[in-house]
Image (spheres, coloured by chain):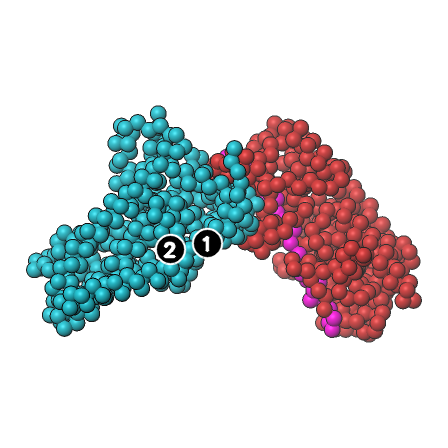
Amino acid sequence: MANIDPKFGKALKEYGAIDFNACYNCGTCTAVCSLSTPEDSFPREMVRLSVLGLESDLTSSLKPWMCYYCGECTTHCPQTANPGELMMSLRRWLTSKYDWTGFSGLLYKSLPLSIIVFIVTAIGVILFAAEESFNLETIIHFGHYFEMIAIGAVFSFILLPNLIRMWYFVILKPKIKVSFSTYLKSFKELIIHMFTQKRSLGCDDNEVRWIEHLILVIGYLSLLFTTVFLDWFSSQNLFIILLGYVESAIIFVITVIFVQSRMNKSKEVSKFSQPSDWFFIIWLLLMGLSAFMVRAFIDLDILESNIWMYLVHLIVLVQWALIIVPFGKWTHFLYRSFAMYFDSLKRNQG
Amino acid sequence: MKIEQEKNISFDALVVGGGIAGGEAALNLANTGFKVLLIEKDLSLGGKMIMLSKVFPTLDCAACITTPKVSEIARHSNITIYTSSEVSSISKIAKDNFEAIVIKKPRYVVIEDCTACQLCEEACPISVSDQYQYNMVGRKAAFIPFSIANPKAAAIDIDNCILCGACEKVCPTNCIDFTQETEEYRVSIKTVILATGFKLFDPVLIPRYGYGVYKNVITSMQMERELAPTRPFNTVLRPGDGKVPDKIAYVLCTGSRDATIGNPICSQICCMYSIKQSQLLMGALPMADVTIYYINIRSFGKGFEEFYQQAKGMGVNFVKGKIGKITETEKGNLILRYEDINEGIVKEEEHDMVILSVGALPNQDASKLFKGEELQLDQHKFIYQSDLLGSPSKTSIEGVFVAGTASGPMDIPDSILSAGSASSEAISYLIQNK
């Protein structure tokens, strides 16, 4: 027996959901959704569960992650209940549910808190730099190690436990029996979806957006690799130097396109932007831009006299690594691909 | 165009619209001794009802109810009828006196002389699609609108006519007159009844249903014609290839309860007329499967629920789920995609003919008629009823009353009731102002 919770809708509205109570259950959203299948029919079911406030059914569901937000449901909804944005809000809500620290939820719900956290981090970086008497070499050295340590720590203490929680909600709690060999066999799904996001190609007329997104993901991951493992800022290798320039330029260009489309609100997907969406895309843009500038300053040999440039980059980097990656929108990179993995497990159980 | 002094005429009441509501209101006024001018923009009286097959929930023949009523109106000595005419403006010139400008378009046929022998139809070389059969068959440019039209007289479709004169030559009574011109009348009246009816939703506005692209997707009004006694084909068939359909689908709420096309309200008639048609189809094509896809079945009126249960009992398949999109197969069949709400599963089903149960939209023409006074519309652009509970026919202008679907979607019995109410209000108004 499930208990309905009328207050749940109000809570969900803090994550960006609008008007979903207007739904009169006609199913147009599900019928026009090109990703909806007889096995996984959505979004109406999610609207219904949200209206009724059946939390445990929502936390065990992967459907919010199976939606890639083409916005057809919202365009055609006869009640203008905006199912597309509800699915987006559910993804934000699920992200905060998976997060064991509870910090995600606080940041999603409170813009002032997010701003405070960003400011505090920036001050921390400046204080650290002051401590080191603004010695460029020490700070760059620190920055490089910070990246490695942050990646390791955020993954081990935040992301991994959160993924385990997701697994618990989706597989363990609903008592789905999955054999060990299925875990192995389905693993390729995880890799494919993590690096290609190929499911989003199923959305109508989504090729351009898919390619932009794919280039952004590859650009981001390879820039990460270039800075952390190839030590871009200290490298003397011409190929590595150029590679870093190209990657950071790509990130900058694609994020500018995404920011523009959120500002123009031309597509259903970009009509409604929460602060978390803006933080994610703008910080990614700043990452690309500041990394490019730092390396350019190094090559022009003016970084020594313009240490502020590196500090800006370091602040953006620290905020990205400590706020957006563990608690912000970055996590969709993991949750989306793990959702496809878990879905494959559920499908192949027994 | 000229305003001739001798065309200044006066009546007690002006009834705008010669459908079932306007006709009923005119008849009530005329029977109590008032002089009525009835203005109909079309070539025939009878409005939409005269086009229908049968009526719900009694399954009485629509034409058999409409035609006697229409001929009673046409023969009534107190009623003057102008067909192919429109009111261009109405001004209140005194407390209980209006002046209306009526424009009468030429029919190019002298109605009184025409015997409806159809020789002109045979002679006319021009074929165009027949709007009275909702474009499913053709007609000539010289034509009788439809077999039960009133007045039953030929008309010339001057937009398509090539002025060859063939009709004139064969006409035995010389009733065809190409010298007719548009005439304008200045009419003095004491009261106005607006019975301007409703418009059907044009499903072209929902491209995912493919109306106008897929030949076997038709509207409910087209199916109404296929089922009527004066039907265009002698059986029910799909327009794409003339095949008699085996598996028919109804898509309810096409253009109703849908904010995306600007009509968020229920049209009140579609559930029941679709159920009626499904029962008629069960009779016409006993081997056919009929499925009605719905959001909610609203069988709220007297005898409606029993009628719905009767359809279920006859084997009509009711599926809860609104159709999301329709695609066409090579054979001209249609694949309907929907979510089966009872199971929560998205499904696809193939049908060989699809009927879009189109909704009722407001006819906003009446709002522009009044000069000096404002005829208020409600939030959905139907005529505003200023005293809905106390005096439902009153509008925002004193002395102007509303009858039938001009005030909102309603079925035929309600339209006739509404016309009764409007005519009694008008009669009472006329007597008080004598």
What residue is at 14 percent from the left and 73 percent from the top? A305
Q: CA distance from mark 1 to mark 2?
A: 11 Å
Q: Is residue A252 left or right of residue B349?
A: left
**Magenta residue check for A16:** no
- In the picture shown, does residue A25 fall above or below A173? below
Q: Nearer the viewer, residue B298 or B2?
A: B298
- In the picture shown, does residue A24 fall above or below B108? above
User: Which residue carries the number 1 mark?
Assistant: A14
Labels 1 and 2 within one chain: yes
Nearest to N terminus: mark 1 or mark 2: 1
Query: Hey, what amino acid is under mark 2?
Result: Leu
Q: Nearer the viewer, residue B130 or A147?
A: A147
- In the picture shown, does residue B81 fall above or below A135? above
What residue is at 35 percent from the left and 40 percent from the top? A166
Q: Residue B246, located in which quarter of the rendered image?
A: top right
Please indicate, yes or no, whether residue B119 appears anywhere in the rendered image.
no
What residue is at 53 percent from the left and 40 percent from the top? A4
Q: Secondary structure at mark 1?
A: loop
Range drawn in magenta:
B349-373
User: Chain B's colour?
Assistant: red
User: Which residue carries the number 2 mark?
Assistant: A107
How many marks do you count on the picture? 2
Q: Position of residue B278 (x, y in %)?
A: 65, 35
Q: Nearer the viewer, residue B421 or A343?
A: A343
Q: Chain of mark 1?
A: A
Q: Nearer the viewer, residue B211 or B201?
A: B201
